Amino acid sequence: MNFLPHDPARRALLKRASVLTAASTVGAAFGAAAAFPARAQSAPASAPDAAADAVPAPVPGVQQGTWRDQSRLRDIPWRLRLPEGDRPVALVVFSHGLGGSLDGGTEWAQAWADAGIATLHLQHAGSDRAIWRGGLQGVKAAASAEQLIERGHDVQFAVEQLLKLQKDGHGAWARVRPEALGMSGHSFGAQTTLAVAGRDFRERSAPDLTESHFKAFAAFSPSAGHFPGGIKGITRPMLCLTGSLDGNPIGQERDGRYRRAVYDTLPAGAKAQLWLEGADHMSFGGGGERGAGFGQRLLGRAREPVPEKLAAHHAALIKSISTDWWRWRLLEDEAALTRLKAPKGLDPKDEWLQG
């Protein structure tokens, strides 16, 4: 996998090419916050604090630890969630939103595990929960090209590690099927997913992002940014999930219509989109995040009642459709494909598109 190189010159080229895209994620990919010491300030008393995170109680089928990328002197916390049994499994790498943690996407991961699919959650230093200590300034500063580059390196390194562990037959990793890997993420994690999927940054000297081990992708609350044309280079299967109230909790966009541009721009043939009426940004986070919606609260914006009222409906559809997406795209499950042709449970204003 040869994306996001360590060479400083090429990293600089990618940074210049992607800076507008990453900057737009302040309005498109909430979940963010990176602590820049010069901008740091005391966090509000109710802000999430990474230092306060206790080690969770053991959960059956769940392991976690930290990998050290020595070339970057960077730690990458990970959490592996496995289905029951000892059969070989497909695996989805999940990237949290800005200001998130290993807990992001937990609800979706459990549904996937129940359907026989493993999940590897990654936590990205510089754009994880710790940035809330910098307040709203930290949130905005974290939505940067540099953080997107670092996230790409995190994914690259994590895949290298899991494939090595799988090849060596190391413990639970031996169950992973190398030919059945997917990637997903919410908000800034969706931006990370688009980048790894092969987004073109319109820079001849930028690295080729199209070569990776991933077979399919799912982007929760994605955004096209200032270079939507770059999305045309993504040819592998991509599922987009968004909704009518999926706006930017700390920016100007107050509904999710602008997020449609991702699906509209993707080339025809292997794309799909779930549009949920009344779903907001938090609807797609997958629970488990104490910081979810915190930026919105900093600005004095209360969550609208509709997403809360429809939460069970939204969650059920997200779980069922994303699960069938993985079972079809990673495991070639024909029954899942049949269900996706006409998903059950959609309300009249919900939409399911494939093209």
Image (cartoon, rainbow, N blue to C red):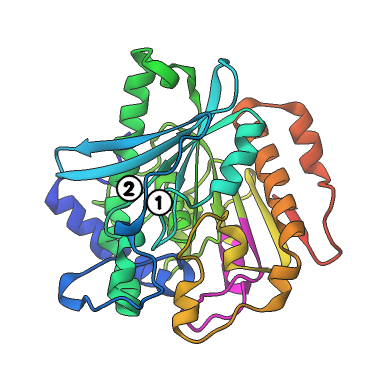
> Does the magenta run of residues contain 261?
yes
Q: Position of residue 123 (x, y in %)?
A: 36, 48
Query: Magenta residues?
Result: 241-264
> Of helix, strand and loop, which one carries label 2?
helix
Outermost residue toward the bottom?
300
> Does the magenta run of residues contain 91?
no
Q: Amino acid at mark 1?
A: Ala
In the image: residue 354, left or right of residue 127: right
In the image: residue 276, left or right of residue 139: right
> Of helix, strand and loop, which one carries label 1?
helix
Q: Depth-wise, is mark 1 or mark 2 nearer the camera? A: 2
Front-lying residue, 294 or 185 = 294
Label 1 sits on residue: 195
The number of discs equals 2
Mark 1 and mark 2 lie on one chain; the one further toward the N terminus is: 2
Label 2 sits on residue: 152
Outermost residue toward the top?
169
Front-lying residue, 95 or 195 = 95
Quarter placement of the N terminus:
top left
Q: Position of residue 90 (x, y in %)?
A: 55, 27
Mark 2, other Cα within 10 Å: few <14 / some 14–19 / many ≥20: many
